[in-house]
Amino acid sequence: MSVDSQTTAHSFTPSTPKRGTRPWDVVLAVAVGAVVIVAVLFLDPLIIGGVLLVVAGLFVVRRGFFNWTTMLFVLTAVVLFVPIRRYALPIQVGFALEPYRVLIAGLLIALAVSIFRRGASSLKPVVWGWPIAIFLWAMFASLMVNAVTLTETELISGGFANIFQLAFLLSVIVLTRQMLSTELVTMILLNVIVFAGAFVGFFAFVERLTRQNIFLMLHQFLPLTILRDDAESLRAGGGRAYASSQHPIALAVLFCMIIPLAIYLMRFSPWPRFTFTRRLVYTAAIGAMLVGMLSAVSRTGVVTLGVMFLFLLVFRPKLAGILVVIGLPLLVVVGLVLPQLVETMVLSLFDIEGVIASQLTSPGMAGQGRLADLPDAFDEFAQYPLAGTGVGSRIVVGDDANAQILDNQWLGTLLEAGVLGIVGLIALFVWPGFVMMRFTLRSSAPESRRFLTFAIATSTVGYATAMFFYDAFAFMQTLLLLSILYGVAAWAMTDSKDARETTTRDATALEARVAG
C-alpha cells in the first residue's frame, strides 16, 4: 500500500466525537442547586435531604421505573391501597398533595409531552370519549344555567371545582388505555387488582376483629402525612371496616366491582396452569373479598351483588348456576362462623317491612332514611327540573351545609343538575354497559376478550346500582377503579393487532415466566 493510500485511508477513519455539555444538563444542575439553597434557607434540611435521596435513586433507575407499564401498576396500587382524604405528601403548598392527585397529574403531564413529541396520532382509541364529553358538558350546562344564582351565593367556584374534579378522575380512563399495551400486561393488571382486593378484604376482616386499620399506618414507613384517622362507624355489635376506603359502603362496592374480574380470571388466567388449582386460588380470593364485605357490614354490597347476579342470570345462566353451586356452601359456612353479620346484612333484607321502616326514619333531621328524603327531593326537583339548582349548590357537610345527605348519587345529581345531569349519568354509566354487551354478544373477537368486556359490564352494572345507595362521586376510590376498568375494556375492544395471535403469544410468554 502506498503512502498516499495510507494517508487517504487514515483521513476517512471515523473519530469518536467528544460529548459536549447539553442544555438539559445545565438546567438540571441549576434546578438541583436552587432546591438545595431553598432547603438550607427556608425548609427542613432533613426532609429535603430525604426527598433528594429518593429523587436521586429514581433517577438512577429511571429507565426501569419511569415507563408506562410500571406507572400503570403504581397507579393501581395507590388507588387500591392508599386511603383517599387520609394521606398527603409532607410538602406544604397551601393544599393537601394527596398521592393519587400527584400521580395522576404527573401522568397527565407525561402524556401531554408524549403527544407533543409524537403527535396526536400516537394516542390509542379510548372508546368512551363521547360518554365522557356528554357527561361533563351536561354538568357544565347545569352550572351555566344557574350561573347568576350561584355567583350571588358565592357557590360558583365550588361548581367549577366539582366539574374539574370529575374530569380529573375520569382522565384515568384515557391514561389506563394509553398505558395498556399487550395481553400480558392486561392479564397481570387484572391479577394485581384481584389479589389486591383479596388483600384488602382479609385486612378488613382483621380490622373488624381488632379495630386496627393497617391502611392508616402507612405513614409509619412511607413519606406521608396523615390528614385524619378519626372515622368510625358501629353496627352489628362492632366497628365497621373501612380498610383502604373512605367509607364502609364504598369498601363493599369496591369488592363487588372486583369479583367479576376474579370470575373471569378463574377461566382465562394462564396462572395457575391446572384448572382445579386456578379455580381454587380465585375462589379463595373471592372468599376473602366477601369476608371483607361482611366486615364492612353494608347491605348496599349485598343488594349490589344481587343485581349483578340477576344480570349474570340473564346473559350467562349456565355460569350463574355454577356460581350458585359454589356460593351456597360458602354462604352456609360464613353464616355458621359469623351469624350476627349474616343476619344483619343478608337475612334482614328479607324483612321488607323492616327495611322500609328503617329508610323512613328521622324525617327532617340530619341522617334521615333514604325513603324519607324522597318527598322533599321531588318537590325541589319540580321547581328546577331541567338544570337543577346547579352543580356544587348542595353542601351537605361543614358550617356552610345547606342540604341533607341523600346517600343517593342519582337523586343528588337530579337535584343539582336536573334532567341534564341524569342524561349525563346515563351517558357515562349506562350507555357503556350497552356498548360492552353489544361487543360481547356480536363481536367476532376471541372469547377471552368478549368475556372480559362482559365482566367489566357486570362491574359497571354493580357500580350504577350502588349509586342509588351512596354518594358515589364523594368516594373517589370506586370511581377511579371503574375508570381503570373502562380503560381495560377499551383495550379489549380496540386492540388493532391480530387478537388471536396476541392472546396466544402473551399467554405462552406468561406461562413460560411462571414455569421459569
Image (spheres, grey):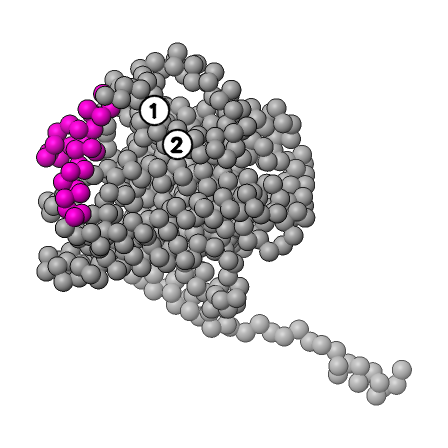
* Residue 288 x %, y %: 44, 25
Looking at numbered disc 2 in the image, what kind of residue is underneath it?
Val
Label 2 Cα crowd, 10 Å radius (few <14 / some 14-19 / many 20+): some
Tell me where residue 62 appears, x and y as whole percent.
51, 55
Q: Tell me which residue sits at (24%, 37%) in the image.
A: 407
Taking depth in this image into account, of 84 and 331 the one nearest to the observer is 331
**Is 474 on the left or on the right of 501, as rendered?**
left
Residue located beneath label 1 in the image: 295
Residue at mark 2: 307
Reply yes or no: does residue 365 show up in magenta.
yes
> Percent x, y for residue 381?
18, 47
Q: Which residues are magenta?
A: 354-382
Give residue 149's mark: none
Q: Is residue 514 magenta?
A: no
- Find residue 311 and report its image quarter: top left
Above or below — where is 159 with respect to 192? below
Q: Quadrant of the N terminus?
A: bottom right
- Camera-side residue: 91 or 447? 447
Task: Note whether residue 298 is visible.
Answer: yes
